[in-house]
Image (tube, rainbow, N blue to C red):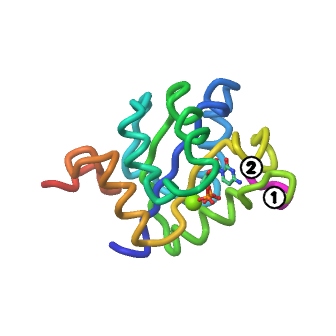
Amino acid sequence: MSGNITFTMIKPGAVKNEHIGHILIMINNAGFRIVAMKYVKLRTAQAEVFYSIHKDKPFYRDLIKFIVSGPVVAAILEKENAVKDLRKLIGTTDPTKAEEGTIRKLFAKSIEHNAVHGSDSDENAIRECNFFFSYNERFSKDGSCMSA
Ligand code: CDP
Ligand code: MG
């Protein structure tokens, strides 16, 4: 299913500001199907693994602190060209540069607190989906479990 799957996470700032519903509507209206979803608070050690790709970046420590500061909504999304289309819906990392109508333009407070995560490649999408979800937590369109 590579190419049709991506991973998203509504970050603590957007959760705290009650934007979960609006963001999920935008995701659904853009044609994504929700394959898996959970509302969880990461522990620091888990966040460090999830964002290990950024461990040498200057913003890494602050990013970890932020992502564990409250619950997140994590989801696997399905659509043709899922990775590319979700990135387009989310907008660029810095919300001051994000395109009008994108999730980050509407809901991000800053480059650090930028409302949502979206996978940047098929390879990272698979890694991120596997980080959060087992196969019996994923469902196909007819409601059957992906591990069945
Ligand atoms: O999230 P995205 O893929 O657009 O950006 P990234 O370069 O993969 O960075 C991951 C996350 O680190 C961003 O979403 C921001 O929350 C944070 N970040 C930051 O705090 N300061 C930066 N200069 C760049 C990214
Ligand atoms: Mg990224």
Q: In x, y percent, where is residue 83?
A: 53, 68
The location of residue 62, given as percent across then percent down, is 61, 38
Which quadrant would the N terminus be assigned to in this image?
Answer: bottom left
Residue in the picture at 30% in, 51% down: 139
| Mark 1 → mark 2, Cα distance in angstroms | 7 Å
Quick one: 108 or 110, which is closer to the camera?
A: 110
Q: Give the image location of residue 63, x and y in percent.
A: 59, 42
Q: List x then y, in percent, for residue 2.
A: 36, 74
Q: Pick whichever, 2 or 58, lies toward us.
A: 58
- Local crowd size for mark 1, using a 10 Å CA cut-off: few (<14), some (14–19), many (≥20): some
In the image: residue 66, left or right of residue 145: right
Say which amino acid is labelled 2: Arg
For the residue marked with disc 1, what is the amino acid? Answer: Ala
Q: Is residue 96 above or below residue 22?
A: below
Secondary structure mostly taken by the magenta-highlighted segment of the chain: loop
Q: Are marks 1 and 2 in contact (CB under 8 Å)?
A: yes
- Identified at 46% across, 55% down, the residue is 7
Task: Residue 98: give its label.
Answer: 1
Specify whether residue 102 is painted magenta. yes
| Left or right: residue 38 compared with residue 32 | left
Question: What residue is shown at x 62% (from left), y 34% (from top)?
Answer: 21
Quadrant in the rendering for residue 40: top left
Q: Picture quarter containing residue 19? A: top right
Quadrant of the image containing the C terminus:
bottom left
Mark 2, secondary structure of its residue: helix
In this rendering, would 89 be left or right of 52? right
Q: Magenta span covers which residues?
A: 99-103
Q: Which residue is mark 2?
A: 104
